[in-house]
Image: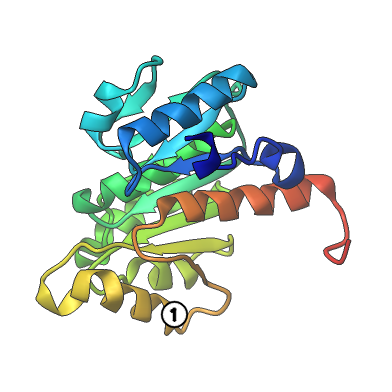
Amino acid sequence: MSDEFQIDFDRDERLGFGEAIFCAGKSTEQVQAILDAAMQQQKSLLLTRCALEMAAALGPPLDYDEVSQTAFFGATAPASDTPRIAIVAAGTSDIPVAREAERTLRFNGRQAHMILDVGVAGLWRLQARLPEIRKSAIVIAVAGMDAALPTVLGGLVPQPIIGVPTSVGYGATRSGETALMAMLSSCTPGLTVVNIDNGYGAACAALRMIARVAADAPLDQ
């Protein structure tokens, strides 16, 4: 089965964040073989979209989170909250995607600050948390339905904002397509947008931003 996968064990050294395994569509036997290979190399892995049944069936002990369907295999780096990253979610239904972003950051040694259920349907909730959000260097904004949260935040705070559209909402939201189009059409300049429900991708974008600032290197290197 080893000919069915090639693990990027050098991703951390090359990109600044570790290898992740997308479990959806893979069999438990395939994921187990990947974990066995990682164990031989004494490497850690992040598992994403790992269903509870798969996590329970896998042999090695995992640090599993059912809400985000993520798991840590192996040791993780000590967490730092400098620079500060805020994950802001519009509604409680957006928490699984927000949690995926948080867990991805945590796997890579970053502690995020979660600010939940502050969607613009009750604008006072967001206004009350703005002082806390302004303390952050990067903001990940997670929202479904009309996905107005990142646009509103972009008009209120100067930090880089990474928008994550979610598939939350009724029929006209088209499983997140409406949220995605709303973010891509935002009148807020400089808003970064990742794919639908892609908390993992948003966290990796934040990690890349942090790495460039820390390195203080020219972008054309």
Q: Nearer the viewer, residue 144 or 67?
A: 67
Could you tell me residue 21's position as x and y percent?
A: 47, 41
Q: Three-letter amino acid code at disc 1?
A: Leu
Q: Nearer the viewer, residue 218 or 150?
A: 218
Could you tell me residue 64's position as x and y percent?
A: 34, 26
Residue at the image point whose x is 26% and y is 37% from the top: 51
Could you tell me residue 163's position as x and y percent?
A: 44, 64
Residue at the image point whose x is 41% and y is 73% from the top: 151
The answer to whether residue 35 is visible is yes
The answer to whether residue 113 is visible is no
Decide if residue 71 is on the left or right side of residue 96.
right
Decide if residue 65 is on the left or right side of residue 154.
left
Is 103 located above or below residue 152 in the figure?
above
Give the secondary structure at mark 1. helix
Based on the displayed image, in which of its 4 quarters is residue 69 positioned? top left
Name the colouring of the figure: rainbow
Is 63 located above or below residue 97 in the figure?
above
Q: Nearer the viewer, residue 160 or 70?
A: 70
10 Å crowding of disc 1: few (<14), some (14-19), many (20+): some
Decide if residue 25 is on the left or right side of residue 220.
left
Could you tell me residue 12's position as x and y percent?
A: 69, 38
Q: Nearer the viewer, residue 60 or 126?
A: 60
Residue at the image point whose x is 87% and y is 54% from the top: 217
Circle 1 residue = 184
